[in-house]
Image: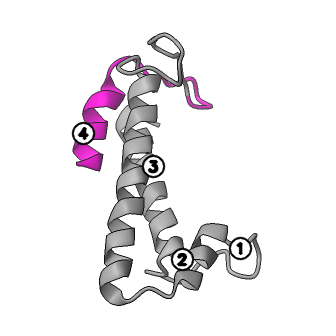
Amino acid sequence: MTPEEFVKAFRDEKESFLDIYFERKPNPYEGIGPKSDVAEMIKQLNLDKEQKEILFKIVEGSLRDFSVTLLYALDGAATLGKEMQQCFDLRDEDGNQLTGGELEGYSGEYFQ
């Protein structure tokens, strides 16, 4: 896996959450995995179309901000929690290094 593929996987995961939360696509785990509490709460709000679009933007922005911050932190470009800013050595199972400066750039490309 390359750093770009890693960032793209984060972006794809964010999109999968949005698909499930807002029923944009059928849930591939329906009936075989746990239900999404978030999706259930959104349904219970019984929002009209405009309200649902606003909520979608809020949730999408939150997932985007969290993903980018985490990716930046892994690459040493942001702090993680209240800890000092530091670069982490993250590798895939084949030993390919994922951190080291490239996650930040790809994050901007895939999350903006």
Q: Which residues are magenta?
A: 92-112
The Cα–Cα distance between marks 1 and 3, rounded to whole angstroms, is 22 Å
Which secondary structure, mark 4?
Answer: helix
Q: Is residue 11 left or right of residue 44?
A: left
Q: Foreground: 75 or 66?
A: 66
> Viewer-nearest of labels 1 and 4?
1
Q: Which residue is mark 1?
A: 35
Up-down: is 103 above or below 101?
below
Q: Is residue 50 left or right of residue 8?
A: left
* Gap in angstroms between the C-alphas marked 4 and 3: 14 Å
Q: Are marks 1 and 3 in contact (CB under 8 Å)?
A: no
Q: Are marks 2 and 1 in contact (CB under 8 Å)?
A: no
Q: Residue under circle 3? A: 9
Of the two numbered discs 2 and 1 on the same chain, state the one appearing first in sequence.
Answer: 1
User: Residue 108, which numbered label?
Assistant: 4
- Counting from the top left corner in percent of width and height, residue 38 is at 60, 68
- Looking at the rendered structure, the kind of residue marked 4 is Gly
Mark found first going from the N terminus, 4 or 3 = 3
